[in-house]
């Protein structure tokens, strides 16, 4: 899972950005999170991240809990959030619309692995046998 920072986009943004201090840090950091738990659990699950970022950065942090993955991409593209917590596919979808820069990835507490893995699955009767086959269409 990646935390991606919204960069400068060629298409611009209709949203009004939050103010920034003399370090270039926004007064309020708006963080979008993908819906990977029940809506009523989202805020509680990500409260430690919100609190950590607020303490470390010295700014207010607002969580934006989208109702679906597309909502996170839409919020990024519209400039409604500054940072997003994304999965692999959502990152690829967002990067097609917005100039993104990956900042961090999760570390598995049990294994110490610092990577995020995604899988591509095809039907057993599919002619696709490799990632190259899928990409080629």
Image (cartoon, helix red, strand yellow):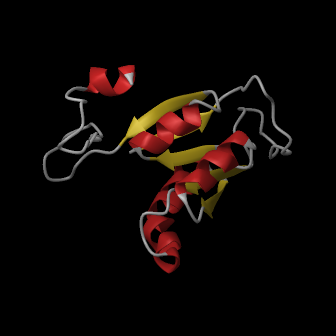
Residue 97 sits in quarter: top right
Residue 119 sits in quarter: top left
**Residue nearest the viewer, comparing 89 with 34:** 89
Residue 94, above or below 137: below
Image quarter where the C terminus lies is top left
Residue 38 sits in quarter: bottom left
Q: Residue at x 65, y 29 (%)?
A: 7
Residue 124 screen position, x and y as percent: 17, 43
In the image, farthest residue toward the bottom: 40
- 60 left or right, relative to 94: right
- 98 left or right, relative to 119: right
**Residue nearest the viewer, comparing 52 with 123:** 123
Number of marks: 0
Residue 67, above or below 9: below
**Residue nearest the viewer, comparing 44 with 55:** 44
Residue 99 screen position, x and y as percent: 63, 27
Image quarter where the N terminus lies is top left
Residue 84 screen position, x and y as percent: 56, 47
Q: Residue at x 40, y 41 (%)?
A: 88
- 115 left or right, relative to 61: left
Q: Residue at x 74, y 43 (%)?
A: 79
Residue 136 screen position, x and y as percent: 37, 19
Residue 122, above or below 131: below
């Amino acid at each position: 899972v990646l935390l991606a920072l919204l960069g400068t986009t060629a298409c611009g943004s209709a949203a009004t950005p939050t103010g920034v201090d003399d370090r270039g840090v926004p007064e309020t950091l708006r963080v979008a999170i993908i819906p990977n738990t029940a809506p009523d659990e989202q805020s509680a699950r990500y409260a430690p991240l919100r609190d950590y970022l607020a303490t470390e950065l010295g700014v207010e942090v607002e969580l934006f809990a989208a109702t679906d993955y597309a909502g996170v991409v839409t919020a990024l593209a519209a400039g409604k959030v500054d940072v997003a917590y994304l999965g692999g596919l959502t990152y690829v979808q967002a990067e097609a619309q917005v100039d993104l820069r990956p900042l961090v990835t999760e570390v598995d507490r049990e294994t110490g692995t610092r990577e995020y893995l995604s899988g591509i699955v095809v039907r057993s009767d599919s002619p696709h046998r490799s990632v190259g086959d899928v990409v080629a269409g």
